[in-house]
Image (cartoon, grey):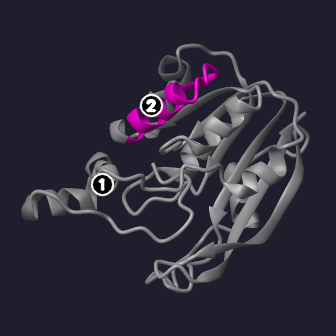
Amino acid sequence: MGAHQHGHQHAHQHGGQGAENAALTDPIASWEDRYGSSYRVWTGRVNRTLADVASGWTPGRSLDLGSGEGGDVHWLAERGWDATGIDLSTTAVARARAVALERELERARFITADLGEWCDDPAAVEGGAEPFDLVTASFFQSPVELPRERILRAAAGRVAPGGRLVLIAHAAAPQWSPHHGEDFPTPESELEALELPGDAWGIEVAEVREREGRGPDGAPHLLSDSVVVVRKR
């Protein structure tokens, strides 16, 4: 879905007015339209913030929600994680699988699924009920309908004891974006939405971090990310 968006992207419209309207309202049509061009939509690299927080963790089982073209899943698999990604877009998943095959990442697995439906029965979508040592959702923000809070609460339910949930979100619009003035997640709002019982979870990170990115013109800009890392006791 909207994971791994490292900069401003333009939705690509195909097939006339009907396709354009569908891309603006229907989640599947919107993300297939976004990934429908022949080039890679995102960078293909791991999200830098995830790499910063997770680089020293012991590998186990990981799940990435809205995995897009698979950059985070590939990075985790390279470091010994049994890494699964789920995304709504069949095009994005096909690209992620192709990269995993090319790089011989046998630990990387990708599933095409609607995360709104995944919430109702995660084990059926994943192919098993075993929980994960790491569940991630990076830039899990969408221009079309997305039951984000319900999905994130379900994500917390898939974390094994001793495991972590990592949420990384755009905390503000980039300088070049038309979306200034809109509401963006904060660490506080993310924690409030998760509704985690304090006796069962510990907060390891809850802060806004800045990183350098590049705009459509290639010029460097500072970008702000909301970063939340919680660990299940």
**Residue 17 in sight from this viewpoint:** yes
| Stretch of the chain drawn in magenta | 92-109
The image shows residue 184, relative to residue 105, as above or below, that is below
> For the C terminus, which image quadrant?
top right
Can you see residue 114? Answer: no
Q: List x then y, in percent, for residue 122.
A: 54, 25
Amino acid type of disc 1? Ser
Per the image, label 1 sits on a secondary structure element best described as: helix
Task: Find residue 172 and report its image quarter.
Answer: bottom right
| Residue 174 within the magenta-colored segment of the rendering | no
Residue located beneath label 2 in the image: 98
Determine whether 5 is above or below 89 in the image: below
Badge nearest the viewer, 1 or 2: 2
Does the magenta segment cover residue 99? Answer: yes
Locate residue 229, reporting x and y percent. 80, 50
The residue under label 1 is 30
**Distance between mark 1 and mark 2 Cα atoms:** 22 Å
Residue 148 % position (x, y): 53, 52
Circle 2 packing at 10 Å, graded few (<14), some (14-19), many (20+), is some
Question: In the image, what residue occupies the spot 40% across and 41% down?
Answer: 92
Pointer 1: residues within 10 angstroms few (<14), some, or many (20+)? many
Residue 58, horizontal then vertical, whole percent: 87, 30
Mark 2: amino acid: Ala
Q: Circle 2 — which element?
A: helix
The residue at the far front in this view is 102
Q: Residue at x 68, y 39 (%)?
A: 75
Mark sitting earlier along the chain (1/2): 1
* Side (left or right) of 192 relative to 69: right
Q: Check the image and report above or below for 57 versus 41.
A: above
In the rendered image, which quarter is residue 104 located in? top right
